[in-house]
Amino acid sequence: AQPVVAVVGRPNVGKSTLVNRLLGRRQAVVKDTPGVTRDRVSYDAVWSGRGFTVVDTGGWDPDAEGVYASVTAQAEMAMSTADAILLVVDANVGVSVTDEAVAKVLRRSDRPVLVVANKVDNQAAEAQVAELWSLGLGEPYPVSALHGRGSGDLLDEMLRRL
Ligand code: GDP
Ligand code: MG
């Protein structure tokens, strides 16, 4: 079976947009309304001739549990089912309390975890990226899931770690 990559993070940080970008086509559901993705969905993707499965964990977007509990549960699930995890953070918002809680869970992971600094749409936004080192998960990878900026470098690094 091919490796599984789980995409986790707070609602509205761009998880589904990133999944679409990694797939190179539009398939995951993206909406401006936080929490719109109700199901955990897997998609098959290929990069540099290597196949992998991407899991959009939007199914743990907040419900009665609240954001904190649902995103933490999402991270626990990813750690038990995925071969690598992409923690998506909105670089324009910076590190939130929820991001810190999820990072704390993911620091226990024995699988590779990459911090994705999303919404870095231009050079000016790069200035926000270094703050994400504070999550304690290594180098943050700046991308614009919306425009594709940095996504090739992210995919290269992800496959190198798998
Ligand atoms: P999810 O809840 O984490 O799955 O987030 P979505 O993928 O549904 O995206 C939430 C919102 O952020 C949508 O309006 C997206 O268009 C927007 N978004 C996602 N990625 C980017 C990005 O790289 N740059 C900008 N400017 N907006 C983005
Ligand atoms: Mg989503």
Image (spheres, rainbow, N blue to C red):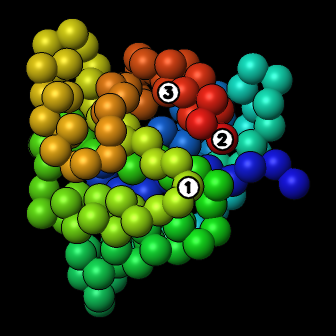
Residue displayed at 39% across by 50% down: 87
Q: Quadrant of residue 65?
A: bottom left
- Marks 1 and 2, how far apart at CA: 9 Å
Can you give x and y, in whole percent of width and height, for residue 61 in the image? Answer: 38, 70
Number of the label disc, if any, that sits on residue 63: none
Q: Secondary structure at mark 2?
A: loop
Count of numbered circles on the image: 3
Q: Closer to the N terminus: mark 3 or mark 2?
A: 3
Find out whether the residues at labels 3 and 1 contact each other: C-beta distance under 8 Å. no
Q: Position of residue 28 (x, y in %)?
A: 57, 49
- Which badge, 1 or 2, comes first in the chain's sequence? 1
- Pointer 2: what residue? 162
* Residue 101 placement, left or right of 79: left
What's the residue at 52%, 48% (across, down)?
112
- The residue singled out by tag 1 in the image is 111
Q: Earlier in the sequence, mark 3 or mark 1?
A: 1
Residue at image point 43% right, 42% down: 114
Residue 60 position in % (x across, y down): 43, 73
Question: Is ligand 1 within 8 Å of the beta carbon of the residue shown at mark 2?
Answer: no
Residue 154, numbered label: 3
Q: Quadrant of the N terminus?
A: bottom right
Q: Residues within 10 Å of mark 3 (few under 14, many from 20)?
A: many
Q: Quadrant of residue 8?
A: bottom left
Q: Nearer the viewer, residue 78 or 46?
A: 78
Which is closer to the viewer, label 3 or label 1? 1
Asked whether 53 or 29 is in front, the reply is 53
Which amino acid is tagged 2? Leu
